[in-house]
Amino acid sequence: MTVTNTTGTSAATTTTGTGSLSSLAEDYTRFLTLLTAQIQNQDPLEPMDSTTFVSQLAQLSQVEQSVKTNSNLETLSSQFAALNAMSGAQMIGRDVTAYSSNVVLGGGETDSYYLLSGGAASVSVDIYDSLDRVIRTISDLPTDAGELHSIDWDGTDDDGGAVLDGSYTMVVNAKDSEGKTIDAYSFRKTTVDEVLFSNGQLYYNLTGDETVSSDAVVAIR
């Protein structure tokens, strides 16, 4: 089981809040020192307006409270982030369906599917290798909308030769009876191997060394 925090968010948040308060405390002390000196050295015949000093003190007090409030909110945010990361750990080992154009081939089998936004007259899938070359085109695939269809790739290229196991990319081409493109979405049914946490967002490392946002997951089994 692996849960990874890739940012160090909590430490950075604490440092920022503490630094702001420390800087404000120094400014506050300097202001009080200057105020005391001005009062001690003022002209008794023309005393300084105390209202101005009171106003300035009130403003500094408001800033101090704002910084403290911001620091508390940052602390709460980091705590919620930590809870979110721990809850994500429950996903490790779970089978999921996630948006993905990756095709992971192993032993002549794949875990890739597609879904059509509307009924099509024809559907085909192009399989690309790591060099962005089409090595296999699969035609006459199911045309029904609203359900997941497997691409049923047996791991061979267009010449019938077996290709190496590994990761490939697929592009679904769906057309209606008039030749217009129909939106198609590709998915993988696979397993979560690792949970990553970065900038307040959960990511899942899937079998086949693919990382997707938690938002890409549409089903959990």
Image (tube, grey):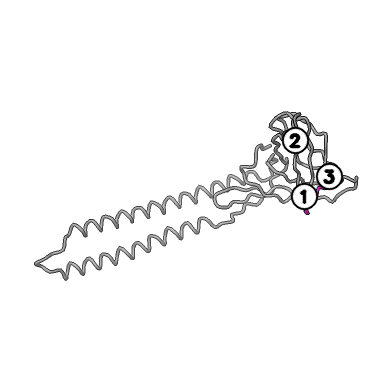
Q: Are marks 2 and 3 in contact (CB under 8 Å)?
A: no
Residue 89: x and y in percent read 62, 47
Q: Name the residue nearer the viewer: 56 or 5.
A: 56
Q: Nearer the viewer, residue 181 or 81?
A: 181
- For this orientation, the residue located farthest to the right is 160
Q: Which residues are magenta?
A: 129-136
- Residue 102, placed above or below residue 140: below
Cα–Cα span, label 3 and label 1 = 14 Å
The residue carrying mark 1 is 167
Q: Which amino acid type is marked by label 2?
A: Ala
- Looking at the image, which residue is at 33% across and 55% down? 63
**Residue 81 image position (x, y, % from top left):** 53, 49
Magenta-colored stretch includes residue 217: no
Drawn side of residue 111 relative to residue 46, left or right: right
Q: Is residue 130 found inside the magenta-colored segment of the image?
A: yes
Q: What residue does disc 3 label?
A: 136
Amino acid type at mark 3: Arg
Total marks placed = 3
49 vs 173: above or below: below
Q: Position of residue 26 (x, y in %)?
A: 33, 65
Q: Earlier in the sequence, mark 2 or mark 3?
A: 3
The local crowd at label 2, few if under 14, some if 14 to 19, many if 20 or more residues have their Cα within 10 Å, is many
C-alpha gap between disc 1 and disc 2: 23 Å
Q: Mark 2 highlights which residue? A: 174
Q: Secondary structure at mark 2?
A: strand
Query: Which secondary structure lies at badge 1?
Result: strand
Residue at 72 percent of width and 44 percent of height: 101
Q: Secondary structure at mark 3?
A: strand
Cα separation between marks 2 and 3: 16 Å
- Front residue of 119 and 45: 119
- Mark 2 or mark 3, which is nearer to you? 2
Check the image and report above or below for 9 versus 157.
below
